[in-house]
């Protein structure tokens, strides 16, 4: 039943409410009738994109794609405190990796600083903006409450005085934080975003592109609608927290002399995933405090972290498409993201053999010094991927857990007297083992059936033992393998009254050394997606792996823990 629901999910195209609004807008009589749909994706370059941004990214680019329109990429760099070209570059790389492109429509919010300043001058001249001398603390104290209007003692300054003060703010005559430019709207509004909001503040700081040219910077709520209007955006798609800011967005574009149409803002619910945090501030904290190896740590929800862990663009796009677009916030299981990756890799990943906890298996009746090769299929789902030669000799590596000297009930792997299949090779019967002084298993001994090449006995007998994987000891390559789990053990580390750092999972990473992999993996390059037979899906680590030191990250286990709601 679960598989049927999943298949139904995959085959059904979800028509979200945003597309319905767009269809109304571009239909005859709609506000954008006869116009090309034009969206934008405006990330702030103060961190790396994460899976939550990916939902917004796909809504922006996907909506434009669906309606044959355009989507701009605009860096929202109006708050220079933590912005950097490193993040600009990474954002572009991540978007391209997901398969989207903005063509020649790449912009910076700071491109519009001069025009934004002139629009502020226009509002002052219309007596719709004024310079305020309240400090941040005084501003907060005078904001009022429900039923109690805000207070602004500088609201009645003349147009001439405001123009003079604002120009002197730009010239750098006043201390940082001493003055702001505020919109004159409604101090008694029930929407506090309209209680004469700040549009400009003084900051003496280097901008990553503008340097020290500017010491006044526009607030997002003022700059963003202007940027949308100047770029000819039809639909400004943003997350739900901006719903209460929409009246301010509309006020700005209605009161400046933009030469184009007024964009329409539509809000959607953010993506929430359990066992993780989406705040860039908190992700930055993890990086800066050394709690992860960097923004691309495979446990991070960043796109570069997911990519390094082995997530594919298609798996992430499938995930975002299948959770749909909603108006109400919800939390998605991380297991569903893993499920989407598992689905994709099951179809595309090459099958190989690797042993994570190796113990030596010696086939005592196999000729010493002899060897042979077996042709093993690369992917049973893709016959066109062909086969590869896998070497075989007298000594092999197998998983330690595939042998028990004294078997437990229903144990079907190797133990003295039991016969099993070696994947793609021969049937072998265990004859005993040798122990180390500490009691651990040093070597396992078995005899093979020469008439069972390929795993099929000539006499047709039924073999009750399991099929186990192996690696030829003569040609095996050493590898380091990293097993990842959720970074947070708490299902809701962002919950109220919680310190997200207290929710970190101490067992989120296990590093295995001395692992053995088949020789075909020696020359692979990242990402190199593989299914290690019986173990899970793995990829070559893009940062630490080399030809001399192979490092593999477990992308996802073989077992699917996701159970769709019935």
Image (cartoon, grey):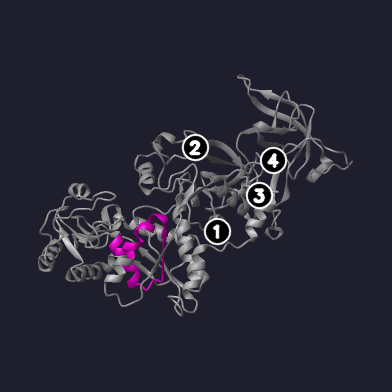
Report the residue marked by disc 2: 508
Q: Reply yes or no: does residue 224 show up in magenta.
A: yes
Instruction: Give the Cα separation between the discs numbered 1 and 2.
Output: 28 Å
Instruction: Give the Cα separation between the discs numbered 3 and 2.
Output: 25 Å
Of labels 1 and 3, earlier in sequence is 1
Crowdedness near tag 3: few (<14), some (14–19) or many (≥20) residues, C-alpha within 10 Å:
many
298 or 563: nearer the eye?
A: 563
Location of residue 497 in the rendering, given as x and y in whole percent from the top left corner: 39, 36
Mark 1 lies on a secondary structure that is helix
Report the residue marked by disc 1: 321
Q: Residue furthest front?
A: 147
Mark nearer the viewer, 1 or 4: 1
Location of residue 274 in the rendering, given as x and y in whole percent from the top left corner: 50, 43
Instruction: Give the Cα separation between the discs numbered 3 and 4.
Output: 11 Å
Report the residue marked by disc 4: 469
152 or 8: nearer the eye?
A: 152
Mark 2 lies on a secondary structure that is loop
Location of residue 557 in the rendering, given as x and y in whole percent from the top left corner: 60, 43
Mark nearer the viewer, 1 or 3: 1
Mark nearer the viewer, 2 or 4: 2
Highlighted range, magenta: 221-249
Instruction: Give the Cα separation between the discs numbered 1 and 4.
Output: 36 Å
Rendered position, 406 above or below 355:
above
Of labels 2 and 4, earlier in sequence is 4
Crowdedness near tag 4: few (<14), some (14–19) or many (≥20) residues, C-alpha within 10 Å:
many
Please give the label number shown on residue 351.
3
**Do callouts 1 and 4 mark residues in contact (Cβ within 8 Å)?**
no
* Residue at figure coordinates x 68%, y 48% from the top left: 2
Rendered position, 90 above or below 24:
above
Mark 3 lies on a secondary structure that is strand
Quarter residue 85 falls in: bottom left
Residue 228 in view here: yes
């Amino acid at each position: 039943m679960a598989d049927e629901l999943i298949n139904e999910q995959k085959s059904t195209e979800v028509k979200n409410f945003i597309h319905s609004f767009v269809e109304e807008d571009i239909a005859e009589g709609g506000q954008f009738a006869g116009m090309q749909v034009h969206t934008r994706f405006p990330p702030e370059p103060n961190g790396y994109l994460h899976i939550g941004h990916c939902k917004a990214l796909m809504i922006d680019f996907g909506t434009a794609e669906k309606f044959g329109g355009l989507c701009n990429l605009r860096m929202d760099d109006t708050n220079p405190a933590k912005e950097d070209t490193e993040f600009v570059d990474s954002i572009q790389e991540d978007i391209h990796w997901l398969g989207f492109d903005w063509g020649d429509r790449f912009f910076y919010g700071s491109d519009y600083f001069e025009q934004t300043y002139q629009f502020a001058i226009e509002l002052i001249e219309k007596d719709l903006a004024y310079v305020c001398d309240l400090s941040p603390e005084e501003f907060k104290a005078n904001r009022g409450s429900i039923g109690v209007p805000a207070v602004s003692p500088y609201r009645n300054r003349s147009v001439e005085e405001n123009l003079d003060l604002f120009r002197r703010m730009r010239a750098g005559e006043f201390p940082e934080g001493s003055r702001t430019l505020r919109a004159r709207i409604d101090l008694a509004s029930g929407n506090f975003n309209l209680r004469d909001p700040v549009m400009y503040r003084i900051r003496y700081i280097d901008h990553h592109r503008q340097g020290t040219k500017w010491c006044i910077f526009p607030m997002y709520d003022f700059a963003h609608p202007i940027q949308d209007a100047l770029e000819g955006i039809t639909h400004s798609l943003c997350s739900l927290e901006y719903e209460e800011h929409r009246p301010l967005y509309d006020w700005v574009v209605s009161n400046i002399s933009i030469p184009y149409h007024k964009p329409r803002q539509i809000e959607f619910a953010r993506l929430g995933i359990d066992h993780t945090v989406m705040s860039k501030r908190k992700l930055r904290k993890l990086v800066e405090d050394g709690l992860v190896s960097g923004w691309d740590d495979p446990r991070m929800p960043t796109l570069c972290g997911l990519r390094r862990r082995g997530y594919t663009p298609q798996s992430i796009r499938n995930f975002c498409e299948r959770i749909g677009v909603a108006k109400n916030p919800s939390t998605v299981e991380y297991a569903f993201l893993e499920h989407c990756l598992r689905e994709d890799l099951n179809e595309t990943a090459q099958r190989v053999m690797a042993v994570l906890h190796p113990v030596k298996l010696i086939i005592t009746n196999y000729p010493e010094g002899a060897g042979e090769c077996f042709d093993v299929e690369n992917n049973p789902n893709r016959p066109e991927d062909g086969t590869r030669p896998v070497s075989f000799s007298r000594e092999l590596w197998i998983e330690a857990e595939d042998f028990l000297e004294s078997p437990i009930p229903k144990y079907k792997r190797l133990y003295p007297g039991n016969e099993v299949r070696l994947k793609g090779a021969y049937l072998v019967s265990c004859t005993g083992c040798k122990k180390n002084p500490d009691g651990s298993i040093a070597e396992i001994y078995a005899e093979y059936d020469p008439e069972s090449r390929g795993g099929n006995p000539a006499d047709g007998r039924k073999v009750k033992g399991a099929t186990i994987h192996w690696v030829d000891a003569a040609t095996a390559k050493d590898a380091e393998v990293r097993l990842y789990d959720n970074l947070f053990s708490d299902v809701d580390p962002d919950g109220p009254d919680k310190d997200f750092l207290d929710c970190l999972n101490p067992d989120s990473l296990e590093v295995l050394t001395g692992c053995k992999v088949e020789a075909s993996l020696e020359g692979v390059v990242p990402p190199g997606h593989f299914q290690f037979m019986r173990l899970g899906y793995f990829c070559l680590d893009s940062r630490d792996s080399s030809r001399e030191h192979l490092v593999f990250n477990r992308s996802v286990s073989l077992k699917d823990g996701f159970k769709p709601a019935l």
